Structures are given as C-alpha cells and as structure tokens.
Image: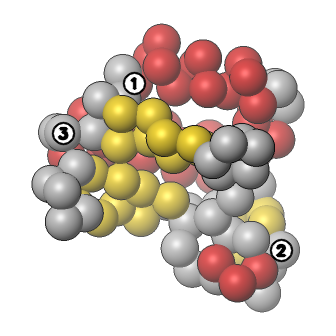
Amino acid sequence: MAHLLRYEEWQGTSGMWYCNDTSDLAHGSGYWWLPARMMKISPAQYIQWVVDNFHPDSISHSEDCSYVGFSWKSQSEMRKYKNKVNALARQENFIIC
C-alpha cells in the first residue's frame, strides 16, 4: 500500500540502534536507497551524507551492495538521522509504493 516514507526505530540484540520504514517490507518499504531517491542524489552521495552528518558507529552491506545498513550505539544519535529522514519525507511528500 502506498504511504509516506516513515522510519521507525529499534534496538537489536547487540545493543545497537537501527531505523527504517518497516511498514511494508514485502513490498520494498525498507529499501536502503529510498532516502537517496527522495533527496535526488546518488546512493554513494547518500552514504557519504549519512557518514558526514550522522556518524553511524557501524555500516554493513552485502557483497553486491543490494543492502546497506547503518547502526548506532546511541539511541539519541540514531534519532537525529531518523528524525531528519522523516522530516525530509514530510517536506517532499515522499510516497512509496
């Protein structure tokens, strides 16, 4: 179902903090590159933007880069990123299907 991109947060068993749109994972709501598309920048520029502005403690990815994920030790640091993505989604009215 089409909806406004909206990141939620959770803490993994490792203690690290994560966020993503988990509302419809079967239909791609959690694709890592959606914020890049929303911001009209390349995936590489998006990764650099996250690193430069939100300083994740860990970046993980699949060998073919079909998955890229960020995580933080601090919930408050992760929230800065989550809140910025959600604010941009509202500003751009970024609807995902």
Q: Which residue is mark 2?
A: 97
Amino acid type at circle 3 is Lys
Image quarter where the C terminus lies is bottom right
Mark 3 in CB contact with mark 2 (< 8 angstroms):
no
Number of labels in the image equals 3
Report which quarter residue 15 is drawn in.
bottom left
Amino acid type at circle 2 is Cys
Q: Secondary structure at mark 3?
A: loop
Q: Nearer the viewer, mark 3 or mark 2?
A: 3
Give the distance between the C-alpha atoms of the residues marked 2 and 1, in whole angstroms.
27 Å
Left or right placement of residue 39 versus residue 7 in this view: right
Identity of the residue drawn at 42% across and 56% down: 19
Q: Which residue is mark 1?
A: 54
Q: Residue 79 at what x, y percent from top left?
A: 31, 44
Of label 2 and label 1, which has the lower sequence position?
1
User: Which numbered dot is residue 73?
Assistant: 3
Of label 3 and label 1, which has the lower sequence position?
1
**Farthest-out residue, front:** 63
